[in-house]
Image: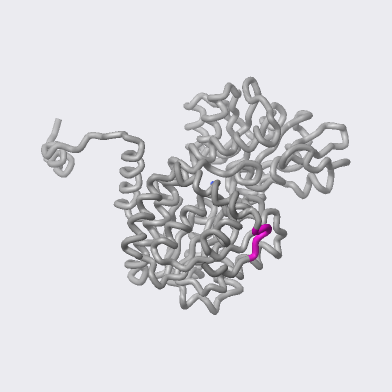
Amino acid sequence: MSTPRHDIADASLAAAGRMRIEWAERSMPVLRSIRERFEINKPFAGIKIAACMHVTTETANLMLALKAGGAEIALCASNPLSTQDDTAAALVHEYGISVFAKHGIDRDGYYDHINAALDIAPSQVFDDGCDLVNTLHTTRKELLPGVRGGCEETTTGVIRLHQMAKDGALTFPMIAINDTDTKHMFDNRYGTGQSTLDAIFRATNTLLAGKVVVVAGYGYCGKGVAERAKGMGADVVVTEIDPTKALDATMQGYRVMPMENAAKIGDVFITVTGNRDVLSHEHFLAMKDGAIMANSGHFDIEIDVKWLEDNATQKNSKIRHQTDEYVMRDGRRLLLIAEGRLANLGAAEGHPAAVMDMSFADQALAAEWLVENADGLGAGVFDVPTEIDKEVARLKLASMGVNIDELTPAQEKYLNSWDHGS
Ligand code: ADE
């Protein structure tokens, strides 16, 4: 096996990375069955894929499925803190996949890596947050004619893509993986719910029972975080700007209030809104000594870290794993996890493999569908076909040994008719 183009931190980590990739694979039965089929059918023969995703053991298994299907791949990181250097090393040196990713890389290096991945001249793109697609449409326009389509993984990326499409900027079809039920109802809820708390525990080892946990944003991610925190005995407060979501949180039994009020009572703050300045100076000034802040929204804009950097009298960097302590003028100490970046991937390992199994099965099947269907779609943002979503759910249930009922012919007829009254 020849060594592919790469820029990674440490080749000597490859063997350790391979062991962890294989460990994740054990919990990804749906993706495994797809990989086995791809190995035979080779749906990606002749297809070059540039992927900008979190370089984790779970993503590694997606890349291996695509490679088994005949794709040539260049992978770069979608977040500087989520890169697992051992995974990157294994992909390059054990599996022959081109990777450009180093944990903790600075902004310039991050974009150099996106450009290096784009140098493959992709016909398909995989994005997680839209940075690669954005780069393609701004500084690498010469590659646009060769791109037939792509997939976007996350809520934030899908929002950016809709904006691009609205402005007439997007030049090819992008499939919104996030919008499948088997992605957002599971990955966003159970994945973000568990992995965000995992990050807080690894970083601070705090006890959640009896604490006031403020969850900003009650989308699927917020629901997951709130449910898990409640399950661990926390007193959960939700903040929202959407009246329906706020009502839902209230009915679910959470206290709902503006952040201005929540800031005074929270012990732990978790932002999952997708918007900027959710925690800013007026909140920092009101928070209790020892308050913990973590962001699990895609970008590091939800907590105004710059204000903390500029106004704290002292910063105790990395007083624990991925935890910075900012000392305020009045002596209060505020704790920030993973520099305000995606905490679940910065301070923990992201979602467990069992949940990424579904999200990445959606990715793999949508990419296969694109090979046949991209040219008929035109530019825009498209849903994953419902059959793919249902197929992933069916395969996951089968892997869990769960059986369900089937419609009887009479039930099917009833559902397809309109002439039965009461
Ligand atoms: N997004 C959230 N968790 C992830 C993981 N474990 N791997 C890749 N992307 C992710």
Q: Is residue 210 visible?
A: yes
Residue sitting nearer the eye, 247 or 277: 277
Is residue 314 rendered to the left or right of residue 394?
right
Q: Which residue lies at the image location 46% right of the left edge and 46% below the top edge?
A: 25
Residue range highlighted in magenta: 7-11
Q: Which residue lies at the image location 63% right of the left edge and 38% below the top edge?
A: 199
Residue sitting nearer the eye, 291 or 146: 146
Q: Is residue 129 visible?
A: no
Membership of 400 in magenta stretch: no
| Residue 229, image x, y percentages | 57, 28
Q: Quadrant of residue 174?
A: bottom left
Which image quarter holds the C terminus? top left
| Residue 251, image x, y percentages | 47, 26
Compared with 327, 379 (above or below) is below
| Residue 313, image x, y percentages | 88, 41
Compared with 328, 42 (above or below) is below
Residue sitting nearer the eye, 128 or 53: 53
Is residue 262 rendered to the left or right of residue 67?
right
Q: Quadrant of residue 290?
A: top right
